[in-house]
Image (cartoon, rainbow, N blue to C red):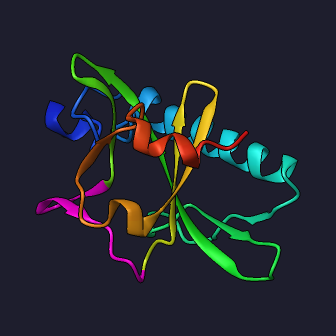
């Protein structure tokens, strides 16, 4: 017999009918990833999805020079302090920043906007306000 704790989403802790991720935690990242893929494909960028799940990056994108970039997709959320994005990951030991050898860029989705931010711009930062003027230059148009 399983306990009710077994039926909690591992990401947000809310009740899940099947003991896996709740619908919101499973659907929102997939929708954000699809938006990023569509935006990059519209720009003529080759995009690949890695077969390994839960790796440090969500997409691979090939630039005009033939270089592949590891992209971690993040979804912005609105708070009283602004539109925030966690530029870190949740591990069994708490939140942990990504390393420069794992991710080249962060694709941040806020509503219909996609920002493609180099890892070096946010290295070691846990959370950013995507509407801060310093990130405007990374908005894909």
In the drawing, does residue 61 fall left or right of residue 81? Answer: right
Residue sitting nearer the eye, 137 or 8: 137
Q: Nearer the viewer, residue 134 or 29?
A: 134
Start-end of magenta stretch: 88-101
- The residue positioned 61% from the left and 40% from the top of the image is 114
- In the image, 118 versus 23, the foreground residue is 118
**Front-lying residue, 20 or 47:** 47
Q: Let me know if residue 17 appears in the view.
A: no
Horizontal side of residue 32 vs 67, given as left or right: left
Q: Looking at the rendering, which quadrant does residue 121 occupy?
A: bottom left
Q: Is residue 124 above or below residue 28?
A: below
Residue 63 in view here: yes
Residue 16, position in %: x, y?
A: 33, 29
Q: Horizontal placement of 116 versus 4: left or right?
A: right
Residue 62 sits in quarter: bottom right
Tell me: 83 left or right of 54: left
Residue 140 picture location, percent across and down: 67, 44
């Amino acid at each position: 017999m399983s306990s009710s704790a077994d039926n909690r989403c591992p990401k947000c802790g809310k009740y899940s009918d099947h003991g896996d991720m709740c619908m919101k935690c499973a659907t929102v990242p997939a929708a954000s990833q699809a938006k990023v893929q569509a935006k990059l494909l519209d720009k003529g960028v080759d995009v690949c999805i890695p077969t390994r799940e839960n790796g440090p990056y969500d997409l691979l994108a090939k630039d005009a020079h033939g270089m592949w970039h590891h992209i971690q997709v993040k979804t912005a959320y609105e708070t009283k302090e602004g539109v925030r994005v966690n530029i870190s990951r949740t591990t069994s030991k708490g939140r942990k920043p990504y390393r420069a050898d794992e991710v080249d860029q962060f694709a941040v989705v806020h509503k219909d906007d996609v920002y493609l931010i180099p890892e070096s711009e946010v290295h070691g930062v846990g959370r950013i306000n995507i509407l801060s003027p310093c990130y405007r230059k990374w908005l894909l148009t």
